[in-house]
Image (spheres, rainbow, N blue to C red):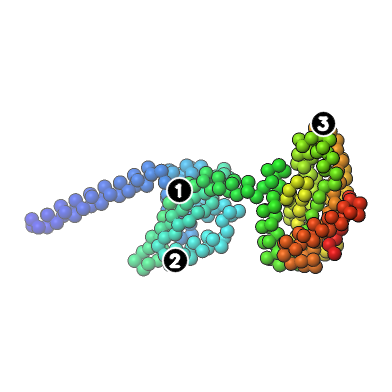
Amino acid sequence: MRPIIQQQQLQQQQLQALNRQLQLAGMVFEKTHEAIVITDVDLRIKRANQAFLNLLNLSSKEIKQHSLSDFIDSNKVSLRLTETVRKHLQQQDGWQGELWYRTAKGEPIAALQTITAVRNQERTVTQLIHIFNDVTADLLAVENIKQQALTDPLTGLPNRAAINHQITVLLHNAPTHLAVLFLDLDKFKPINDTYGHDVGDQLLRCIGPRIKAQLRHHDVVARIGGDEFVIVLNALTEPKDAEAIAQKLVLALQQPFVLEQHTVTVGASVGIALYPEHGEDYETLLNKADNAMYRAKESGRNRYCVAE
């Protein structure tokens, strides 16, 4: 009898020790500053700690109505990536990377996320444990630096580096028709000389919106320096459409600009280079559009010319 009693006592002690471990694990789960959520393989939320609720501005009642995928920021995280993560976890026990989410209020959250797969005896994934470290401030700071590097500080338009990249991407995708317009303001220097550079800067800030008003939603305008602007017309139905838009730009920029204390009038000369007629790479197209713009100036300004 004594060995049986001793065995029962040992089992009871082991059970008590296991309960204490479970209580400790539960306390760590709830009290840790790291956001933790447990989901099934379809990302339906089974349990989440308070740090996770705080991260996404949710209550414990609300969380039961959601899947983790409800909060993934689809503007920053592609379906291809989420499928890649799913397939990775079918083969591996863990994954780590950066994912973007949206809180219940729509605010962006960037998380360095570690996902651990829990498997049964048949090695089938039954649950996923997600641990989040909020890195939003760091990534937003990096994005801000990148944005500043690609933005003209005076006008807020894309700068030379940004337009170079965008045109390169567009050309890589082999569009049917694309036009590069090189636009240079006429008589801008006399305005700077007469009224000062502050007025000149005010004028340049007004140029971007007026150009945009003549373009389609998927066209792009950039300031590449001084009073020079580059416009990319993508997905043209036919090459002649570029000339129609260039004429609209010339007419629009002939209209007076009312600044704080002055009304000033400029104009614009525009050169047009077409893909693939005038070149198949950005440098060639830009140079030919630039040359065409100078021909427009030599022909009397306030007009456009198409590359030869």
How crowded pointer 3 is (Cα within 10 Å; few <14, some 14-19, many 20+) is rated as few
* Number of marks drawn: 3
**For residue 293, above or below residue 61:** below
Q: Residue at x 76, y 59 (%)?
A: 286
Q: The residue under label 1 is which amino acid type?
A: Asn
Mark sitting earlier along the chain (3/2): 2
Residue lying farthest to the right in this orientation: 300
Mark sitting earlier along the chain (3/1): 1
**For residue 154, above or below residue 289:** above
Q: In this view, does 192 lie to the left or right of 133?
A: right
Q: Nearer the viewer, mark 2 or mark 1?
A: 1
**For residue 246, above or below residue 261:** below
Asked whether the residues under the numbered discs 2 and 1 touch, taking CB atoms below 8 Å apart as contact, a structural biologist would say no
Residue 244 visible? The answer is no
Q: Residue 178: where, in percent of width, then height?
A: 77, 62
Which residue has dot 1 on it?
133
Which residue has dot 2 on it?
90
How crowded pointer 2 is (Cα within 10 Å; few <14, some 14-19, many 20+) is rated as some
| Badge number at residue 261 | 3
- Where on the picture, by quarter, is residue 193? top right
Specify the quadrant that holds the C terminus. bottom right
Q: Residue 115: where, in percent of width, then height?
A: 43, 56
Q: Residue 60: where, in percent of width, then height?
A: 46, 44
Residue lying farthest to the left in this orientation: 2
Q: Nearer the viewer, mark 3 or mark 1?
A: 3
